Amino acid sequence: MRLPSWQIGYALGIPIRVHASWFAIFFLLTWALATDYLPDSLPGLPPERYWAMGGMAAVLLFLSVLLHELGHSYVALRYRVPIDRITLFIFGGVAHMRKEAPTPLAEFLIAVAGPAVSFVLGAVCLGFVALAEPIPQQRGLRGLVILSTLLGAVNVQLGLFNLIPGFPLDGGRVLRAGLWAWGKDFYRATKQASIIGLGFGIVFVLLGFAMLAGSAMGGAPASMASNGSWIALIGAFLFAAALASRRQAALRQSLAAVPVRNLMVTTVVSIPSQCTIEEAVNQYFQPYGYGGFPVLDDGRLIGLITVHEIQAVSSAVWPWRQVGQVMRPVSPSLIVEPDAPVIHAMEHMAREGWDRLVVMQDGQVIGLVTQSAIMHFLQLRKP
Ligand SMILES: [Zn+2]
């Protein structure tokens, strides 16, 4: 779904975004509460009160999902796994981790932290209900008890649903952590846990359709139709997510098995640092057609110059500005060893924003590995 999302703030230093599809669920929820659930459980109030309470409950449910994701994020950050952002959308929330958990134990703890937060929230809400229920109630307290019951039940359900052991649900991550610890192979564990995710996706779709059929043939309450379509939708979403995870794991597995040496360009052309930008453009960039060149000084690598750095300099100064003055200076992040797996080179580039790395062995430049070479390799070997 290519819909926009908006940033609404930060928590734990992580940007929080709301996806356009989230508004659909917010409205549906408020509407269902205001016109059905609340008038049933708390009769005799004016409609605007129901809408206000419904809206408030929807916001609190949204906060519950956010706290669940912050639970994952908090533990991830403890393990130095950066979180790019948290997005809330129609089916809940996602904390986008920039890299995978470092160990099976870390993966397990990050995965269970979300449901743990949901269960604690559920227990607090339902505990409040248990305490307040016996007290003779005025309407204000009664409203609070009804909201807490709803919130408690939803949080417990959120925790339970997420513990279903199909990847990429939290329970599937717990399963992957176990398979990873057992078989010592992260990618194989991901593929196996994703297959269970595919299975649960299919089961949910079938169950949803069975409920739809049941209500269409009569004999079942009408609410079953909406529940059925919701369950089928969630199943389809889980299926698609599990399929994507499986494909990605297969892809990464193939990139983890290939050394940089096999993909690198070995006919490296480099530019001397005293060269002016104009010379670089006329004698290197245009005739060779490459996107970037290593920069050498006395045969020693001192940086990399790409089209990007040249574009940043006004063409008026090209005749006298030297390459050494505008290049990106060499740093360990620019260099990769020939025997490192391609997946490391790729993560390197993604993290630093490079599109190529210099391959060095024993202090000598022996090749270049580029993002486009990796893409071509992947296209040829589609899993
Ligand atoms: Zn979760």
Image (spheres, helix red, strand yellow):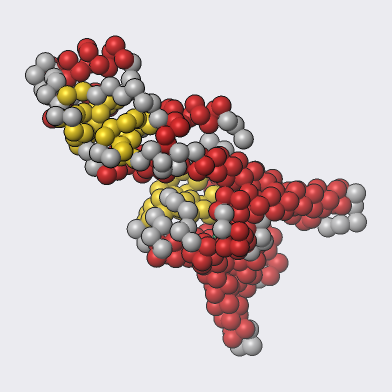
Viewer can see residue 60: no
Instruction: Determine which quarter of the picture holds residue 77.
Output: bottom left
Position of residue 323 measured from the top left corner of the image (x, y, whole percent): 16, 25
Furthest-front residue in this view: 362
Residue at horizontal 61 percent and vertical 63 percent from the top: 182
Quarter of the image where the N terminus is located = top right
Vertical order, 138 against 260 (above or below): below
Vertical order, 287 against 358 (above or below): above
Position of residue 266 measured from the top left corner of the image (x, y, whole percent): 36, 26
Is residue 10 left or right of 50 when viewed as pictured? left
| Front residue of 66 and 181 | 181
Residue at horizontal 39 percent and vertical 65 percent from the top: 78
Position of residue 279 measured from the top left corner of the image (x, y, whole percent): 17, 15
| Front residue of 52 and 197 | 197
Instruction: Determine which quarter of the picture holds residue 102.
Output: bottom left
Is residue 275 left or right of 62 when viewed as pictured? left
Residue at horizontal 31 percent and vertical 38 percent from the top: 361
Residue at horizontal 38 percent and vertical 60 percent from the top: 80
Viewer can see residue 282: yes
Is residue 322 left or right of 338 when viewed as pictured? left
Furthest-bottom residue in this view: 135
What is the count of numbered marks? 0
Position of residue 38 measured from the top left corner of the image (x, y, whole percent): 65, 65
Quarter of the image where the C terminus is located = top right
| Front residue of 226 and 86 | 86
Furthest-left residue in this view: 320
